[in-house]
Amino acid sequence: MALREVVHYGDPILRKACNPVKDFDNLSPLIEDMFDTMYEENGIGLAANQIGVDLNLFIIDISGIEEEEDRAYIFINSEMVDSRGESWFEEGCLSIPDVRLEVKRPEFIQIKYQDETGAAHIEEMEGLMARAIQHEIDHLKGVFIVDRVTKTVKMTVEKDLKRISEGAASRAKTRKAFVL
């Protein structure tokens, strides 16, 4: 459908908890735009607020990295209900271009969510899929990878964060509100 601008660190929409999806009737164009944008940006996940939309919705497609994954996922009104184990992995973020940080997260998760029809699901995920889900759920809660590292580690990317955030707030003022 259409590419959307990826919202960058410093934009206020990325620091607020997103509203739940209540109307499932007209989500398809938004979801298509999100996939188009994610693929164009070479990402594996994208939360709605990363394109300026205040909804609890994210997508993930790791099929280009994990051979056993053969489909893309849509998660709406998601909630992590359980987790166990831990692993460290270097993560990047489309909203913080060119910044990569080692982040510790649970290795296994259980997630409750709705699909694009509104049907409820509970699934267990592990590995890269679990990590990507946690990263996107963080976005929906206003949390970044830089919030998951020590202050010392964050200081190593402060110049990058300042550069990225310059202009993000002013671009936010010109963004039109998304209406379903």
Image (tube, rainbow, N blue to C red):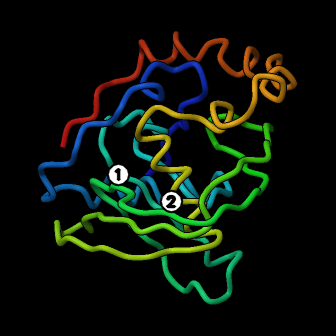
Instruction: Say which residue label 2 marks.
Output: 133
Picture layout, residue 127 above or below residue 88:
below
Counting from the top left corner in percent of width and height, residue 20 is at 22, 44
Q: Amino acid at mark 1?
A: Leu
Picture layout, residue 163 above or below residue 39:
above
Image quadrant of residue 124? Answer: bottom left
Q: Image check: 112 left or right of 175?
A: left
Query: Residue drawn 75% across and 30% down?
Result: 150
Query: Residue drawn 30% across and 57% down?
Result: 76
Query: Residue drawn 38% across and 65% down?
Result: 111
Q: Marks 1 and 2: in contact by CB < 8 Å?
A: no
Counting from the top left corner in percent of width and height, residue 12 is at 46, 19
Q: Between residue 157 and residue 43, name the one nearer to us.
A: 157
Upstream in the sequence, badge 2 or badge 1? 1
Q: Which residue, as the protein is rendered here, is positioned at the far right?
A: 156
Q: Amino acid at mark 2?
A: Ile
Counting from the top left corner in percent of width and height, residue 34 is at 44, 53
Q: Determine the CA span between mark 2 and mark 1.
A: 11 Å
Label of residue 3 in the image: none
Image quadrant of residue 173? Answer: top left
Image quadrant of residue 17? Answer: top left
Instruction: Say which residue label 1 marks.
Output: 57
Find numbered disc 2 in the image and state the secondary structure of the residue it sits on: helix
Counting from the top left corner in percent of width and height, residue 174 is at 42, 15
Query: Residue drawn 71% across and 75% down?
Result: 65
Q: Between residue 129 and residue 99, name the one nearer to us.
A: 129
